[in-house]
Structures are given as structure tokens and as C-alpha cells.
Image (cartoon, rainbow, N blue to C red):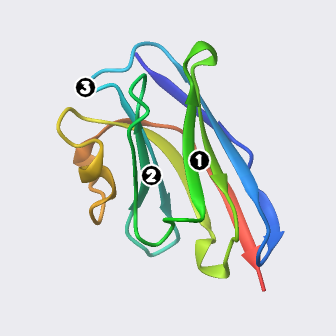
């Protein structure tokens, strides 16, 4: 059974940066893809970045493209999300997740992310950006 544990959230001002980490334990089913999504109270899940482990192919939602970077350290079984130029609208709880087969890559960031598309996700880490 895979488990994911996020860390690195916090409070920053507009324009600030944070680096989130996700440690993955257990096997990674499906397409060997890990993604980050975020959700605010009353809002739908938004898939923002995904990466194929080993291939390093990455995908981003338009809302974060050019500001966020997803990367992985396979030896440490850790996936990172470097977030630069943060804006108040980036405020949300951020989760790392394993998408089900066929729901990774581009499909993870293509629109509203459904829970049924996910194999597993972590407990989340809160990011707050103030103006």
C-alpha cells in the first residue's frame, strides 16, 4: 500500500517562494506518475503538476506554468514542488497524489480533478499567501 506524506507548507507574502516535499512509501501503482493538486474550502480539486518518475516528463496547469516546478529524487522517493512568485490565489491545501492508470500526466492537470481518478493521496500541507 502506497503512502504519501507532504511537508513544506507555510505562510508567505505575495512574490515569495516555498518548496513542498512529498515522501512516497510503498509501491507506486498505475503509470508510475506522481502529481500535486490543491484545494481550497468550497473549491474543486485543481491538478497543478505531475511527473513521470524516472522519465522526468512533467506537466503543468496554466495557472502555475512558469512559476512552479515539479521534480523528483527517485533515490529518496521524494517529489518536490518548487513554488515561486506566489500569489494570494495560490492559497490552498496542497496534496501529492498517485493517479490511477490513464489519469496521470496531461490528464492530471487538464481540468477539475475527480477523486475517482486518484489511487492515493497524502494528508495535505497548507499554503497561505498574503498580499
> Would residue 80 appear left or right of 110 to someone viewing this image?
right
Question: Camera-side residue: 118 or 20?
Answer: 20
Pointer 3 residue: 30
**Among the two numbered marks 3 and 2 on one chain, the one whose residue lies closer to the N terminus:** 3
Question: Residue at 41% of width from left, 70% of height from top?
Answer: 62
Q: Nearer the viewer, mark 1 or mark 3?
A: 3
Residue 79 point in image, percent of width and height: 57, 33
- Pick out the residue farthest to the left: 102
Residue ranking furthest to the bottom? 131
Which is in the foreground here, disc 3 or disc 2? 2
Indicate which disc residue 25 carries: none
Spatial CA span between label 2 and label 1: 15 Å
Dividing the picture into quarters, in which one does residue 7 lie?
top right
Residue 105 at x, y percent in the picture = 30, 44
Residue 54's quadrant in the figure? top left
Q: Image check: 22 left or right of 48?
A: right
- Disc 2 crowd, CA 10 A, few/some/many (<14, 14-19, 20+): many
Q: Which mark is residue 49?
A: 2
Mark 1 highlights which residue? Answer: 124
- Residue pictured at 73% horizontal, 74% vertical: 129
Q: Nearer the viewer, residue 128 or 17?
A: 17
2 or 1: tag closer to the N-terminus: 2
In the rendered view, tell whether residue 42 sits above or below residue 31: below
Mark 2 element type: strand
Amino acid at each position: 500500500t502506497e503512502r504519501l506524506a507532504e511537508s513544506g507548507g507555510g505562510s508567505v507574502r505575495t512574490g515569495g517562494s516555498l518548496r513542498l516535499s512529498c515522501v512516497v512509501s510503498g509501491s507506486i501503482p498505475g503509470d508510475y506518475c506522481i502529481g500535486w493538486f490543491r484545494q481550497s474550502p468550497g473549491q474543486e480539486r485543481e491538478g497543478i503538476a505531475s511527473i513521470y518518475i524516472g522519465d522526468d516528463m512533467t506537466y503543468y496547469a496554466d495557472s502555475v506554468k512558469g512559476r512552479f516546478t515539479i521534480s523528483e529524487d527517485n533515490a529518496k522517493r521524494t517529489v518536490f514542488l518548487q513554488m515561486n512568485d506566489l500569489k494570494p490565489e495560490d492559497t490552498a491545501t496542497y496534496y501529492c497524489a498517485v493517479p490511477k492508470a490513464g489519469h496521470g500526466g496531461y490528464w492530471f492537470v487538464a481540468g477539475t480533478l475527480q477523486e475517482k481518478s486518484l489511487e492515493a493521496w497524502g494528508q495535505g500541507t497548507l499554503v497561505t499567501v498574503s498580499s
